[in-house]
Amino acid sequence: MTKQKLVIIGNGMAPGRMLEHLFEKDRDAYEVTIFNAEPRVNYNRLMLSPVLSGEKTYEDIITHGDAWYEEHGVTLHKSARVSEIDRIGKTVTSESGVSAPYDKLVIATGSNPFIIPLPGKDLDGVLTYRDLDDVEKMLDAAKRGGRAVVIGGGLLGLEAAAGLKMQGMDVTVLHLMPTLMERQLDPAAGFLLEEEFKRRGIDVRTKANSHEIVDDGTGKVKAIRLDDGTEIEASIVVMAVGIRPSADLAKEMSLDTGRGVLVGDDMRTSDPDIFALGECVEHRGMCYGLVAPLYEMAEVIAENLLGGASEYTGSVTATKLKVTGVDLYSAGDFAEGDDREEIVLRDAAAGVYKRLVLKDNKIIGAVLYGETADGPWFFDLLKKQSDVSEMRETLIFGQAYQGGAPLDPTAAVAALPDDAEICGCNGVCKGKIVGAITEQGLTSLDDVRAHTKASASCGTCTGLVEQLMQVTLGEAYNPAAVTPMCGCTHLGHSDVRRLIKSKGLKTIPQVMQELEWTSSGGCAKCRPALNYYLVSDWPDEYADDYQSRFINERVHANIQKDGTYSVVPRMWGGMTSSTELRAIADVVDKFDIPTVKVTGGQRIDMLGIRKEDLPEVWADLGKAGFVSGHAYAKGLRTVKTCVGSDWCRFGTQDSTGLGVKIEKFMWGSWTPAKVKMAVSGCPRNCAEATCKDVGVICVDSGYEIHFAGAAGLDIKGTEVLGLVKTEEDALEHIVAVTQMYREQGHYLERIYKWAKRIGYDEIRSQIMEDAEKRKAYFDRFVFSQKFAQVDPWSERVSGKDKHEFRPMAVLQAEAAE
Amino acid sequence: MNAETRNWVAIGDLSDIPREGARVVKTGAGCIAVFRTVEDEVFALDDRCPHKGGPLSQGIVHGTSVTCPLHNWVFDLATGLARGADEGSVPVTAARVENGKVLLAADDLARRAR
């Protein structure tokens, strides 16, 4: 049977998802051709805001690369805007003259930004915020500086404003309505949001009606004038007031259209062989601009393309604002009404506002500001129409407060049945451990490990085993063997890490509350540890708490004994150039830096810099291309290299190149303690790789990977992890072992101590022998890097954390009198 | 002297200081570290640890204490006394918040200047 032909017009997220579903169900049903007006592959449009703010790059947000299309046999015509559809001959033709016949057609033309018909709307410098081209134009404008005026205080407008601010522009937001995001937020939450934006230095003006965009005389934007006559100078104007379904093509071919392309519940248009999908659709009077409904439609179409009879019946939507540091979630309907009740929680000190709207004991709307971890849970209750009368009293406090799970971990262990598995690695159940303890009179953890193998592998169940010993032995077990993290808790690091994961704890106050911290606010020992564990466990959800970081990580420089700081710029793999050295020399002269020193990690250290000077020092270094060397971080410090096969007559591989590659891949990652690496080009080992946390010795046949060395308080040669053949393999193994350490290490515990605790063989077997596990570690590292690889110096040059570097006030002696 | 009859000097807004953080106020007689706790109380101590002169403003603030960034001495923000096994104290300047403004006691400032 010959394949049917499927043509898709548009290459956004919805058709991407639809094809995934289609191929999953039946790889061979259709031969697929896509016409895309944009000159690119498929990317995650939701992530444009992080690209604008500089937190991600275009490459990070690609969802389907060229390889995907090739692998799935999909023909993708890029930069091909469809101009004509012949419904009788069943052919689609693009402006550029490419045509393709179809049996089934999917229209997924998306939406167009709404342009307010103001005088001056066509001037150079008036932009919209819809696709990557728009983002590139904004980034370009941001480089030139000046003021950006964003029209529209909705989701898109605010994300654009925050991004442009992070890129260093002055930003004004103009919003017609009295409060921001009035379609998703009630006035109280809108007000909190406005305050937050103002606090970031963004000028927010509500009830502001734009009148005209003013020409500078050369066809470029100069300012914007409001109805009340106010004129705001602007180098760009971004219109982000909404979107309109793009239905023109459907209309031209005489399909039924309203605001969008009209479809039935089966997602078919008025022509049964033509489906419509995504933002261009009007379904039961609704047009959607959020991704969740589009994904639901995509699934229905995939089903129906294969002869199914699936139906789409509309969606309830939830919104999350993607601005780093602002937690905001809203779902459903939250207007007030006589038949509705509401539950409100306000905690001004913590900046938290939560409001649930109930009707007939069911949640119909939710607004969360400041703390949104429970958003998905409330949304689930809302979608399922669950009766919440049982938990009404504690509902607003979220999921963690429901169900009455025992807080005392020991009691929880005592309550487990005998056949409950305690150690997953070695398949040891509770009964076996308790039996061994009583029959053989075991009193220490090491004994239990030796006799039962429980917690002898990955070690993550150590806390459980210890609690089991406590339950079984009572007074006879000395819990002092579990060293508590600090004076604020009786729990050790392993317990805390395990409980953070198992209880889904996502903020420091939540950890302290749930794990019954005995101090208010913790101490200088536990706070940085908890902050690291949360950063490591929830990279995408946890907002790094800078006040819980040691000063060096808070200001991204190393404090010295006299209160001045030292600055170490990154020199990838220890490589530098005349331009870089000249820039360093200039900075040293300009800021009168007293000491310049070459470090053991092949970097240059400038010592004795006044704190107030740091941003300017970084600005100058940044101009020469330098980024932070993280010499202050519990994170990847340096990858030291020798010159390898580039120059050395003994070099077997490109050790410098590999070192640079590793460093570029791994910089910015936080780890339990500092991580130093090295790559040597031959066994003569000039880069001293065999006393590093992770080291590579290149040999003729490949790359020998080492780990768990030390050359500080302790001196210890590395252990061999294994030999791999290619650079790619080396990188994957190094990243995987580092991620394993990131997930299991105790705060301030170097790799060699962690490895000793876990067992070298266990690490070798997970990283060298279990390809699936290795890949999973690797993927988790890559995921967390998306949130970590932001140069902290350039962020601060653009104004982040200004308060850190300036005195609050300067008082004259007389003023005190 | 009680709060009503004392003279106070405004040094800025409460919101200028991060919660669980500190800012520095420069004076002719050395720097003062002004702390803000998680409960929005403010305290002011000389920005100089009696141990080795570490800048207390750079320490981690927890509860109503601060830990010096150089050698981890812990001080009570209200009394300026070292906590735990260490012995020593830091001069305190009375501080309070009024209408969102942070105020320091003028007589304490004057005493420091002498």
Image (cartoon, coloured by chain):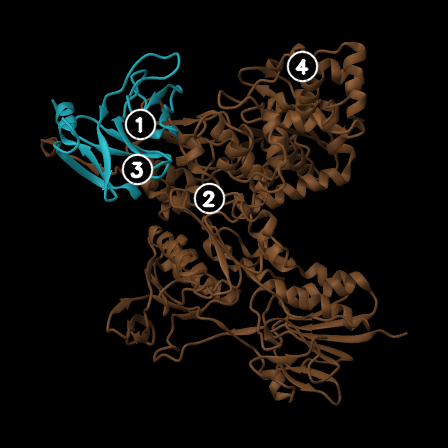
- Specify whether disc 1 shares its chain with disc 4: yes
Of callouts 2 and 1, the N-terminal one: 1
Please state if A336 lies on the left or on the right of A191 as rendered: right
Query: At 37% from the left edge and 57% from the top edge, which residue is drawn?
Result: A191
Label 1: how many Cα within 10 Å (few below 14, some 14–19, many 20+): few
Find numbered disc 2 in the image and state the secondary structure of the residue it sits on: loop
Image mark 1: chain: A
Above or below: residue A138 compared with residue A111? above
Provide the residue designation for mark 3.
Answer: A613
Proximity of marks 1 and 3: CB atoms separated by less than 8 Å: no
Q: Tag count in the figure? A: 4
Q: Position of residue A14 (x, y in %)?
A: 65, 66
Kindly indicate whether the residues beneath marks 3 and 4 are on one polypeptide chain. yes
Q: Which tag, 1 or 3, sits closer to the chain's start?
A: 1
Q: Position of residue A198 (x, y in %)?
A: 33, 54
Which residue bears the numbered disc 2? A791
- Which residue matches tag 4? A474
Front position in the image: A269 or A810: A269
